Amino acid sequence: MWISKATGPPTLSPFFISDPAHISAVDSTNREAVEELLQTYGETGGINYLDAAATLPSRLAIEAACAELMSLMFPGFRSEALVSSEDLADTTRIRVRHLHARLKTEICRSLGKIPPDEATEAKAEEVLSEFLKQLPSVRRLLWTDIDAAYEGDPAARSYEEIILAYPALEAVAIYRMAHLLYDKVPLIPRIMTEWAHSRTGIDIHPGAKIGENFFIDHGTGVVIGETTEIGARVKLYHAVTLGARSFQKDEHGKIKKGGKRHPTVEDDVTIYPGSTILGGETVIGARSTIGGNVFLVQSVPPDSLVYYEEKQLRIVPKRKKRPATTRDEFRE
């Protein structure tokens, strides 16, 4: 290393003092922190890494599977190498084989058996085979969603633009595939939709039931709860919440699981930005339009228009600016 004669050798920062006593104190503090952490792993009843977490499905593996699934739905659109028509069959077979191997391991993990026993492996194979068989139907359903986006958004110039640049399509595509696994294997469907949520800002629970020709315009901040039911040709805008109104509790004060907690939205409904619709008994009737920033906890008949009667808009001249100093104020 070259050192200037004018400046001499570099001096050590006071923060990097090789004092044995200081190092010993740091090591002691680290040992105490480790011991206390290890104690919490056992005493709080949480997941112990070696005994439980090691058998859980890998988020990284599921996220990679989501990327592979999007490539299967839209080959050539997901930043992977483009394939010619002649190569598409072989490429698709390879992708399905890779996906099968990746997901089978994670399904076995989600079922709590690693290494899997014979029954777990058979169950994983059954679930996975059924899932892969349904992917062509999902792709056909997604084309209705793309049609809905193209017809419902005047800014959409092409199908290619929607596939490449619309976050809602990614969120809905992953939801539709995660929905196939819902109630068949634990954890994996939620990891899938959370992957889409983190990328798009659109939170769709895999348990929701959503019909064809579904479109979310813009999409940021949309929340669709587990027991939501959405009909065909429904359009949502950003920041719409389809949520639960309240939670029933048992005799011990703990929230009861399950039950219809989220609203039903019938066919051909449009819900504008910022609206919140809550409750398992709330039904939005077919062909209704819900205006922006509406808060609903009651049902709406079919063919309704729901909006707030706002005050009349006023446009008035601005007030004169305040004087810059107190002296100026007294001069007025």
Image: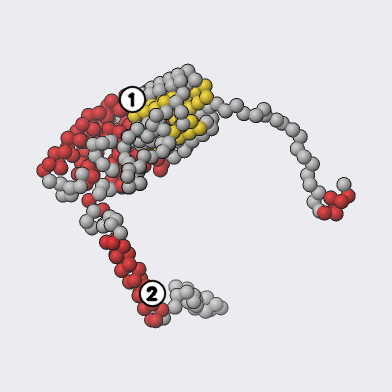
Q: Quadrant of the N terminus?
A: bottom left
Mark 2 or mark 1, earlier in chain: 2
Residue appearing at x 27%, y 55% in the figure: 47
Is there any visible trace of residue 176 in the rendered image? yes
Residue type indicated by callout 1: Leu
Residue that sits furthest to the left in the current view: 118
Residue 26 position by quadrant: bottom left
Q: Position of residue 252 (x, y in %)?
A: 32, 47
Q: Position of residue 108 (x, y in %)?
A: 19, 44
Task: State the residue in front, 231 or 278.
Answer: 278
Residue that sits furthest to the front in the current view: 251
Is there any visible trace of residue 71 in the rendered image? no
Q: Tell me the tag on residue 315.
A: none
Q: Is residue 19 above or below residue 128?
A: below
Q: Position of residue 268 (x, y in %)?
A: 43, 20
Q: Tell me the tag on residue 26.
A: 2
Residue appearing at x 46%, y 23% in the figure: 300
Task: State the residue in front, 195 or 101.
Answer: 195
Q: Is residue 44 above or below residue 177?
A: below
How many numbered discs, if any?
Answer: 2
Residue 39 position by quadrant: bottom left
Residue type indicated by callout 2: Val
Residue appearing at x 47%, y 18% in the figure: 303
The reply, left or right, for residue 104 in relation to residue 64 is left
Label 1: few (<14), some (14–19) or many (≥20) C-alpha neighbours in 10 Å: some
Q: Are marks 2 and 1 in contact (CB under 8 Å)?
A: no
Task: State the residue in front, 116 or 246.
Answer: 246
Pointer 1: what residue? 141
Say which element carries label 2.
Answer: helix
